[in-house]
């Protein structure tokens, strides 16, 4: 039995009862992992004919009347799986004529440019914002991954020469780094270069195969080759092998395949490998690469225009009933907001913690004694939401794993029935890599605590009780909604758009990426403060514990510098906690839109006189933080000094 066949056998055994595949074993089926599994199984059709038929049947359950594919119970705007499904169906033999409604749907989906936005102001000199691509969700910016899949699918359907494909390929080339690789979108943020990521680089290379001859393509191949040579993550290695498999004209690339294949096989042998990652491994090791385009294999149908959409990714305009319903929901949410009781206590406790080697669990236990009566943990399902954005060993970006370790210990000592750690990073899709590399994985193993990848968790539609973004509903992680106690564990950091990123901003990661994309840019465009407040109005954290032992100042949340403070800050009122942290950092909370809006929505208290200070006074640990460049334009004006 070949190594690939063994992986496919295991993969077939991980199918859900409905025939589809989830991102993780036992989780609900989703079109993307189902498509990847189908592509892998199709490399050995005969032995796996039944699992393929079952998987196709499940995929069709996500087929929408407009020709698109999306999670049936997911966010309607998040139709980014459509081109993945189109490519899968065509690769498995569906004639383009049969797929014409889906082809039309892909062609009708366009990205847009938002110019009146702090992010758009910065990227105009970095990339060509006039190019049309494909978004993660309707009417949003064009990103590398959805644009790559759309170009790949349309080219497989025979639309190589279509203007949308040609412009999409141009967009991908525009987004690639001269030095090699690609990120999800722009190459520069506020004058600081972003870094390439293996996954987007791989799908970009798949999309441009045989169509673009440019030094940036060669540089991307070189980046993937170099990354694969030292990588130890299965998902990164598999994507690299799949993409390099269609860019294998040079001897150096081909010579690395045997060693690369062996590394993938060894990592995939882990019995806990998820269906998503196992499908990628099987695709990487298959004797034939289904991602390699076979030009001329299909004659494409003449593209049409869907009846309800013409050249736009927006959904049909809401009718009168929908508008009335939206106004009713808005009025109801406003009424709930006015009646919302403030937290039982707005007390905030500051404790000295000089280093991460201090007895953090003991320090936290002493702090929590002040909040136990208001928030008992005994017998509760507790979900911890740390701040895990990217891993860079030379920067203090994330909540330190030793703080998470101490909080898990606290929860166990308090008698919590279950402790779960959950996060949905806005930058990297491969959260498995981040958990392991950051050191968080070792902490989870030590305590036997499971990790939930919120980005790929089951989304649940809930009424938006904030309404500052004008969204009627939010799609939140079921794991977060099922928490009896949600603890926000942010890092004490400045943020180049929000001013600070603390316990409220940390909840950005509770919205699944499968609904909002990466880096959840749609929420930024609707207003970062507005989005933060909507999330906290709808499902706030019950307890906030800020890692202020070593924070980040300057160009946070990624590119700033370490700032030692030596404190842990705790409270059950997230606005009071964040306001206290802002004062500690030397930034008046009254200047921070997020905190002002949150206080107005009764999420918590912002006035210093209304926040009982426990433990150390703010002045005892206050440390002036350097603010991010250009952040003044995002803050409310400083109050004028009176003579």
Image (cartoon, helix red, strand yellow):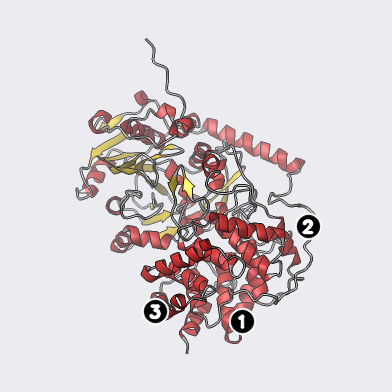
Q: CA distance from mark 1 to mark 2?
A: 35 Å
Instruction: Estimate the spatial distance between the alpha carbons at disc 1 and disc 3, rounded to whole Å.
Output: 33 Å
Q: What kind of element bears circle 3?
A: helix
**Circle nearer the N terminus (1, 2):** 1
The spot of residue 46 in percent (x, y) is 61, 87
What residue does disc 2 label? Answer: 305
Of residues 495 and 317, the one drawn nearer to the viewer in this rendering: 495
Q: Quadrant of the C terminus?
A: top left
Question: In front of the other: label 3 or label 2?
Answer: 3
Residue 347 visible at all = no
Q: Is residue 537 above or below residue 18?
A: above
Q: Secondary structure at mark 1?
A: helix
Label count reads: 3
In this picture, is 176 found above or below 43?
above
Instruction: Give the SS element for disc 2.
Output: loop
> Disc 1, disc 2: CB below 8 Å?
no
- Camera-near label (1 vs 3) is 3
**Residue density around tag 1, few if under 14, some if 14–19, many if 20 or more, within 10 Å:** few
The residue singled out by tag 3 in the image is 259
Q: Earlier in the sequence, mark 1 or mark 3?
A: 1
User: What number is the disc on residue 583?
Assistant: none
Q: Can residue 217 be seen by looking at this rendering? A: yes
Q: Quick check: 44 left or right of 532?
A: right
The residue positioned 78% from the left and 57% from the top of the image is 305
Q: Residue 552 at what x, y percent from top left?
A: 33, 42
Residue highlighted by disc 1: 50
Q: Are marks 1 and 3 in contact (CB under 8 Å)?
A: no
Which of label 1 and label 2 is nearer to you? Answer: 2
Residue 230 appears left or right of 319: left
The alpha-carbon separation of the residues under discs 3 and 2 comes to 48 Å
Quarter of image, res 627: top left
């Amino acid at each position: 039995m070949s190594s690939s066949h063994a992986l496919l056998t295991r993969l077939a055994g991980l199918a859900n009862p409905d025939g589809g595949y989830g991102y993780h074993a036992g989780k609900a089926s989703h079109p993307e992992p189902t498509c990847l599994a189908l592509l892998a199984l199709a490399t050995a059709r005969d032995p796996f004919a039944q699992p393929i038929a079952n998987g196709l049947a499940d995929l069709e359950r996500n087929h929408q009347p407009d020709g698109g594919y999306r999670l049936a119970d997911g966010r309607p705007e998040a139709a980014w799986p459509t081109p993945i499904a189109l490519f899968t169906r065509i690769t498995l033999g569906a004639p383009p004529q049969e797929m014409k409604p889906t082809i039309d749907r892909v062609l009708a989906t366009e990205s847009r440019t938002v110019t009146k936005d702090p992010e758009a102001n910065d990227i105009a000199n970095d990339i060509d914002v006039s190019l049309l691509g494909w978004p993660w969700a309707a009417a949003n910016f064009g990103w590398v991954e959805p644009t790559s899949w759309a170009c790949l699918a349309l080219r497989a359907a025979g639309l190589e020469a279509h203007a949308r494909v040609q412009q999409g390929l141009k967009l991908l080339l525009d987004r690639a780094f001269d030095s090699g690789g690609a990120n999800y979108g722009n190459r520069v943020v506020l004058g600081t270069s972003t870094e390439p990521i293996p996954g987007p680089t791989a799908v970009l290379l798949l999309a441009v195969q045989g169509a673009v001859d440019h030094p940036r393509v060669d540089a991307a191949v070189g980046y993937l080759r170099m990354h694969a040579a030292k990588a130890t993550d299965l998902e990164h290695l598999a994507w690299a092998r799949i993409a390099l498999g269609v860019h294998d004209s040079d001897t150096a690339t081909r010579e690395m395949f045997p060693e690369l294949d062996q590394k993938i096989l060894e990592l995939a042998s882990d019995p806990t490998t998820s269906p998503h990652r196992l499908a990628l491994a099987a695709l990487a090791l298959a004797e034939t690469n289904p991602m390699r385009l076979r030009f001329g294999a299909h004659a494409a149908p003449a593209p049409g225009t869907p009846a309800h959409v013409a050249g736009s990714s927006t959904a049909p305009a809401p009718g009168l009933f929908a508008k009335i319903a939206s106004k009713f929901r808005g009025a109801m949410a406003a009424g709930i907001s006015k009646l919302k009781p403030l937290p039982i206590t707005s007390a905030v406790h500051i404790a000295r913690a000089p280093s991460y080697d201090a007895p953090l669990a003991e320090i936290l236990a002493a702090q929590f004694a002040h909040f136990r009566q208001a928030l008992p943990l005994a017998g509760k399902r507790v979900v911890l939401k740390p701040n895990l954005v990217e891993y860079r060993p030379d920067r203090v970006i994330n909540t330190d794993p030793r703080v998470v370790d101490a909080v898990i210990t606290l929860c166990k000592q308090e008698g919590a029935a279950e402790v779960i750690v959950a996060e949905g990073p806005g930058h990297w899709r491969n959260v498995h890599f981040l958990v392991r590399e950051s050191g968080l994985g070792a902490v989870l193993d030590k305590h036997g605590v499971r990790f939930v990848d919120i980005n790929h968790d089951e989304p649940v539609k809930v009424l938006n009780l904030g309404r500052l973004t004008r969204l009627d509903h939010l799609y939140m992680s079921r794991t977060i909604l099922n928490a009896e106690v949600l603890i926000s564990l942010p890092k004490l950091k400045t943020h180049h758009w929000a001013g600070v990123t603390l316990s409220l901003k940390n909840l950005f990661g509770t919205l699944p990426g499968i609904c909002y994309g990466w880096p959840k840019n749609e929420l930024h465009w609707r207003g970062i403060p507005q989005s933060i407040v909507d999330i906290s109005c709808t499902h706030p954290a019950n307890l906030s514990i800020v890692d202020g032992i070593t924070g980040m100042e300057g160009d946070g949340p990624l590119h700033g510098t370490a700032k030692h403070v030596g404190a842990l800050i705790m409270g059950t009122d997230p606005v009071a906690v964040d306001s206290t942290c802002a004062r500690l950092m030397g930034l008046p909370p009254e200047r921070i839109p997020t905190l002002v809006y949150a206080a107005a929505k009764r999420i918590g208290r912002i006035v210093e006189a209304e926040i009982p200070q426990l433990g150390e006074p703010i002045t005892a640990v206050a440390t002036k933080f350097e603010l991010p460049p250009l952040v003044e334009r995002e803050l409310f004006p400083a109050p004028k000094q009176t003579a």
